[in-house]
Image (spheres, grey):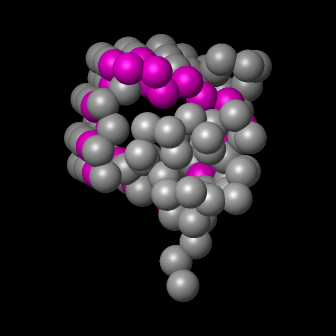
Amino acid sequence: MNTSLSEAVFDDARVRGFFYDCSLTAASLVGTDLSHSQFVGPRGANRFGRARLIETRFRYTKISTAVFKRAVMEKADFLGAVLAPEIAPHLTDRKILPSCVPGQAPVDD
């Protein structure tokens, strides 16, 4: 999907998708389950600026490119997600991810 979902409200939704260069700017994704989705595209694609990512689940997603600047992120779940090398450190710095191996989110034991 290549589209603008800016300001969309997907609270408590379950979405499994292939996102290619989507804008989710200022979208509300509170409690949304995006598990097993893929986020791909050119550098800087899949923009989550000012989005509300509260208790949003990104379990087992593949995130090759995404921008989370100014997104409100609390208790976002990236369990088992495969993250591009530049994304994992950004999420770790924001205290979203614990320290982990670059490129992969922690896996449940």
5 drawn magenta: no
| Residue 13 seen in this snapshot | no
Dominant SS in magenta? loop
- How many discs appear? 0
Q: Whole-percent x and y of residue 60? A: 59, 60
For this rendering, which residue is in front, 67 or 101? 101
- Residue 80, position in %: x, y? 59, 64
For the N terminus, the quadrant is: top right
Q: Is residue 36 left or right of residue 31?
A: right
Q: Work out which residue is located at the far bottom of the displayed protein and give it.
A: 109
Q: Say whether residue 6 is left or right of residue 99.
A: left
Part of the protein shown in magenta:
48-70
* Residue 109 appears in the picture as rendered: yes
| Residue 4 screen position, x and y as percent | 47, 14
Task: Name the residue: 42% across, 56% down.
Answer: 77
Residue for point 56% across, 57% down: 99
Residue 96 spot, x, y in % from top left? 42, 47
Residue drawn at 58 percent across, 72 percent down: 107
Image-based side of 9 in relation to 22, left or right: left
Question: What is the quadrant of residue 64 in the picture?
Answer: top right
The residue drawn where x is 60% and y is 29% is 66
**In the depicted structure, whether residue 107 falls above or below residue 3:** below
Quarter of the rendering occupied by the C terminus: bottom right
